[in-house]
Image (cartoon, helix red, strand yellow):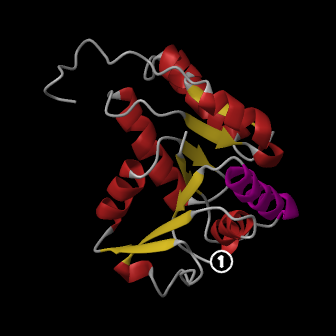
């Protein structure tokens, strides 16, 4: 892995561990020479992951749509800041600049970005590892819901099990590096991918 896109909250949340894990993740990515690609804000969980990477010599690429540039208080000390015209362009660039996807605690926007990348994986549009840093069990209920989708026949078991989940940053990154992509679904042709 050379670059990981991290989806996370522009808010801090109400548990200290969210910010602590975000900082340590940024630091660890920098130490492992993995570029951080993220939403470009200097606040919240987003700001902490960037701070951790920047303070340890990492390359940090922020990608933010024009309309959020002021609202999310963009980070001025990044290695690179890319401003896009809209959210769709933002996600497409994040995808193009990364070869791994990682979700930290966040809200609706975090889930929306993560699930779009997860859907693209299911459709065979990218072969990248998709992971959740499950700080303090933050995503336990979400994982239960995803398992229910498997149980009720809406999600294939192998797609659910392809999601890498761990509370330990080093283990999570190691699993991402060793990820073997699922085969492209048989109902998809090469021309569609």
State yes or no: residue 19 in magenta: yes
Find residue 89 and report its horizontal and vertical position in percent.
30, 62
Find residue 48 and report its horizontal and vertical position in percent.
72, 68
Q: Main secondary structure of the magenta part?
A: helix
Is 176 left or right of 153, judged from the image as shown?
right
Q: Residue at x 62, y 64 (%)?
A: 9
Furthest residue in direction top, as rendered = 186
Q: Residue at x 35, y 57 (%)?
A: 93
Q: Residue at x 16, y 29 (%)?
A: 192
- Residue 167 seen: no
Front position in the image: 131 or 52: 52
Furthest residue in direction right, as rendered = 16
- Residue 172 seen: yes
Is 104 left or right of 93, judged from the image as shown?
right
Front position in the image: 179 or 111: 179
Residue denoted by label 1: 43
The segment highlighted magenta reads: 15-31
Q: Eyeballing the image, is 41 above or below 111?
A: below
Find residue 185 and report its horizontal and vertical position in percent.
31, 16
Is 100 left or right of 22, judged from the image as shown?
left
Q: How many numbered tags mark residues here?
A: 1
| Quarter in which the C terminus is drawn | top left
Mark 1 is surrounded, within 10 Å at the Cα level, by few (under 14), some (14 to 19) or many (20 or more) other residues, namely some
Secondary structure beneath label 1: loop
Find residue 151 and report its horizontal and vertical position in percent.
55, 16
State yes or no: residue 78 in magenta: no
| Quarter in which the N terminus is drawn | top right
Q: Eyeballing the image, is 157 above or below 63?
A: above
């Amino acid at each position: 892995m050379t670059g990981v896109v991290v989806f996370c909250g522009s808010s801090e949340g109400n548990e200290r561990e969210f910010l602590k894990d975000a900082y340590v993740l940024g630091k660890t990515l920098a130490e492992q020479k993995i570029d951080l690609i993220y939403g470009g804000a200097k606040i919240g969980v987003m700001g902490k992951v960037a701070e951790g990477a920047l303070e340890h010599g990492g390359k940090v690429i922020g990608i933010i749509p024009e309309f959020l540039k002021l609202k999310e208080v963009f980070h001025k000390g990044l290695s690179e800041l890319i401003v896009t015209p809209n959210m769709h362009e933002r996600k497409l660039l994040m995808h193009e600049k990364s070869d791994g996807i990682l979700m930290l605690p966040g809200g609706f926007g975090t889930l929306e970005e993560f699930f779009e990348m997860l859907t693209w994986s299911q459709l065979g549009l990218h072969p990248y590892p998709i992971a959740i840093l499950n700080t303090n069990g933050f995503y336990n209920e979400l994982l239960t819901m995803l398992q229910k989708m498997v149980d009720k026949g809406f999600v294939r078991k192998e797609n659910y099990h392809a999601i890498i989940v761990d509370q330990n940053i080093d283990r999570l990154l190691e699993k991402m590096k060793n990820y073997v992509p699922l085969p492209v679904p048989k109902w998809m042709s090469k021309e569609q991918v």
